[in-house]
Image (cartoon, rainbow, N blue to C red):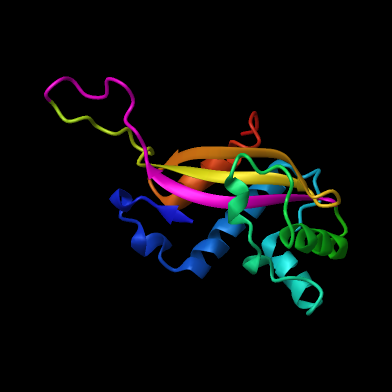
Amino acid sequence: MAAEEALQWDTLIGDRRTTLDKSDSIIATLLGARASEVNWVGPAELRHIARRAPGIAPDPDQMGTPFLRASNIIDVPDPLRYQLRTLMGLVGGRYVLVPAGLVFRVASLPPGAGPRGSPAVRPPGHLAVAELSVVMIDSRIGRIGWRTIARGEGDDPWTALSRAVKSLTPGLP
């Protein structure tokens, strides 16, 4: 997780653990509500399952998932492949939806915003863009089946992230 310096959100997202927990909560809550037909296992439950199997299951927060953002990766390499398969064996599923990265960027102004010679005014609710990298992995064969970067705008990180997650399930209110 990172934010461009121009946003000056160091105080909002500076505490890594708190920020990750809040982001995980937003993602799990919105996906659970917007795609209720899926049996979602959220991060808190996944951590609990991993703690109950010490020496067998890896710590979900210490797995090397950020490199999955690279668009040229198709096959998940070991040890991540093995770790995902082990966790999914304990969870009882096959597919893993991995939030591989979250970046907050300054929202670009729409073309023609502001007349010549006067400062451009950013519309309300459009200070930043959250870019959430998401990857779907088939844990049995260790292959990435789908990836996207979900985007959402907002005046704070949580609104922008919420809108990015909502963009994963278009057509719902």
- Expressed as whole percent of the image width and height from the top left, the position of residue 87 reads 80, 63
Is 124 placed left or right of 34 in the picture?
left
Locate the C terminus by quadrant: top right
For this rendering, which residue is in front, 14 or 148? 148
Range shown magenta? 94-117
- Expressed as whole percent of the image width and height from the top left, the position of residue 81 reads 76, 57
Q: How many marks?
A: 0
- Expressed as whole percent of the image width and height from the top left, the position of residue 64 reads 63, 61
Q: Residue at x 60, y 39 (%)?
A: 71
Considering every residue shown, the one lying at the far left of the view is 117
Q: Residue at x 38, y 39 (%)?
A: 125
Residue 158 belongs to the span the image colors magenta: no
Q: Quadrant of residue 57?
A: bottom right
Q: Residue at x 32, y 50 (%)?
A: 7
Q: Is residue 164 above or below residue 52?
A: above
For this rendering, which residue is in front, 80 or 21? 80
Residue 112 belongs to the span the image colors magenta: yes
